[in-house]
Image: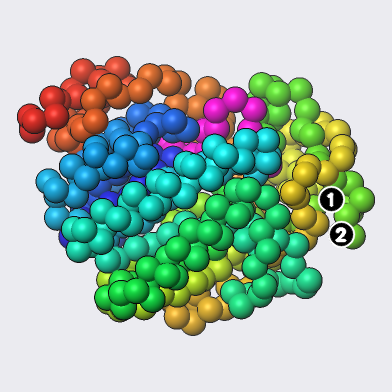
């Protein structure tokens, strides 16, 4: 059974890919590598000992994406691909609307055309905007406060309409909170381009000396110490939540929405303190004004996912900080090589036992040739 994962080479996607392979699924990744690195492919194989297929395609290119559906028997799709930085979305809203919404429409059009009606969609807790209370349940009002969150909300509404039009679809919409951590092997983790937008990779880059200090956005929130509170979830728990949601969509025809979080909120300063206690490294920081679109407190009620998917987060903040630091310490320069794969398809059998991204590139096959 082949599962197509869009954005499967990214931070979250790579961990989902590992969990899918470990669960016995056949994996196919579509990624344009705009915010990921081909080296992750070798790392996924090293962790799992299993092979998979990869297509370098931008979902905005409907013609190339259609070839994937023509040439393969796909059973279900996990859709992760898209732009994800809240701050950037405020500065460049049209870029976010075009990329996130149009790519999803292209994908769903082809899924419908080729009778693939099983979908797990990566949404976000940003769709809730500034909630009146916490923890946040799935039936709370939706009022996204930034373009990124609004693209997620619009896509959710598109998916609702698709299901209303054709009840043969089965869709799980996953609203997840703040994924951090890394695979316990230290082989895959968060590898942002440039200065990180998210808290944990910023902390780890300060810890290794790449950045001078952490900038903490917001110091007067109505929280325990004035800094923002978030529901941080280990990326492995998040990945397992996707596998649980996939199992459900493969067995049912329905549309459901689930929060994926721990139900526990931590402030920025609490995360810094936890990281310092684990690593013994002091993290210098500077308090500054909140970013446009940020909210004070956000954590989940994930009881619906526990009841209907049999899923709940298992790892705590200690494991999150420990695994994030292990990844950063073992990979101070991330995935090292930022070269992109030049062809749209590589067969995984050519990737096995490779030692570098350069070797991956040497084994890229012609689009009409299979190894």
The disc placed on residue 19 is none
For label 1, count other residues whose C-alpha is less than 10 Å away and answer few (under 14), some (14-19) or many (20+).
many
Is residue 148 in the magenta section? no
Q: State the CA–CA distance, disc 2 to disc 1.
A: 6 Å
Q: Which residues are magenta?
A: 185-199
Q: Is residue 6 left or right of residue 287?
A: left
> Picture coordinates of residue 132 (x, y %)?
78, 71
Identity of the residue furthest to the right in this view: 220
Residue that numbered label 1 is attached to? 227
Q: Is residue 320 visible?
A: no
Which residue does the image show at 38% across and 76% down from the upper left? 164
Residue that numbered label 2 is attached to? 223
Which residue does the image show at 32% across and 37% down from the upper left? 61
Relative to the observer, which residue lies in front, 202 or 82?
82
Residue 358: image quadrant is top left
Relative to the observer, which residue lies in front, 153 or 235?
153
Circle 1 SS class:
loop
- Marks 2 and 1: CB-CB under 8 Å? yes
> Picture coordinates of residue 133 (x, y %)?
77, 72
């Amino acid at each position: 059974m082949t599962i197509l994962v869009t954005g499967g080479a990214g931070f979250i996607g790579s961990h989902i890919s590992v969990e899918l392979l470990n669960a016995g699924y056949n994996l196919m990744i579509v990624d344009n590598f705009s915010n990921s690195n081909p080296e992750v492919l070798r790392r996924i194989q090293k962790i799992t000992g299993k092979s998979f297929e990869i297509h370098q395609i931008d979902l905005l290119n409907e013609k190339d994406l259609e070839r994937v559906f023509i040439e393969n028997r796909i059973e279900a799709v996990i859709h992760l691909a898209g732009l994800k930085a809240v701050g950037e979305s405020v500065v460049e809203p049209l870029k976010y609307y075009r990329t996130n919404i149009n790519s999803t429409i292209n994908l769903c059009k082809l899924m419908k055309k080729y009778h693939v009606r099983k979908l797990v969609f990566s949404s976000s807790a940003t769709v809730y905007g500034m909630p009146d209370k916490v923890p946040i349940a799935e039936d709370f009002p939706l009022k996204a406060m930034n373009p990124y969150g609004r693209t997620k909300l619009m896509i959710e509404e598109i998916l609702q309409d698709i299901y209303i039009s054709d009840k043969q679809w089965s869709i799980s919409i996953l609203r997840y909170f703040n994924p951090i951590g890394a695979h316990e092997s230290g082989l895959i983790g968060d590898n942002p381009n440039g200065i990180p937008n998210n808290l944990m990779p910023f902390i780890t880059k300060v810890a290794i000396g790449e950045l001078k200090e952490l900038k903490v956005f917001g110091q007067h929130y109505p929280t325990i110490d004035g800094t923002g509170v978030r529901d941080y979830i280990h990326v492995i728990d998040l990945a397992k939540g996707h596998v649980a949601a996939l199992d459900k969509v493969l067995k049912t025809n329905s549309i459901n929405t689930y929060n994926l979080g721990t139900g526990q909120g931590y402030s920025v300063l609490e995360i810094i303190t936890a990281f310092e206690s684990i690593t013994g490294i002091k993290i210098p920081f500077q308090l500054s004004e909140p970013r446009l679109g940020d909210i004070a407190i956000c954590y989940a009620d994930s009881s619906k996912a526990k009841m209907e998917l049999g899923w709940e987060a298992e790892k705590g903040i200690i494991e999150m900080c420990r695994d994030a630091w292990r990844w950063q310490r073992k990979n101070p320069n991330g995935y090292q090589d930022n070269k992109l794969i030049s062809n749209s398809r590589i067969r995984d059998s050519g990737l096995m036992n490779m030692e570098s991204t350069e070797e991956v590139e040497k084994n890229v096959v012609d689009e009409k040739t299979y190894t």
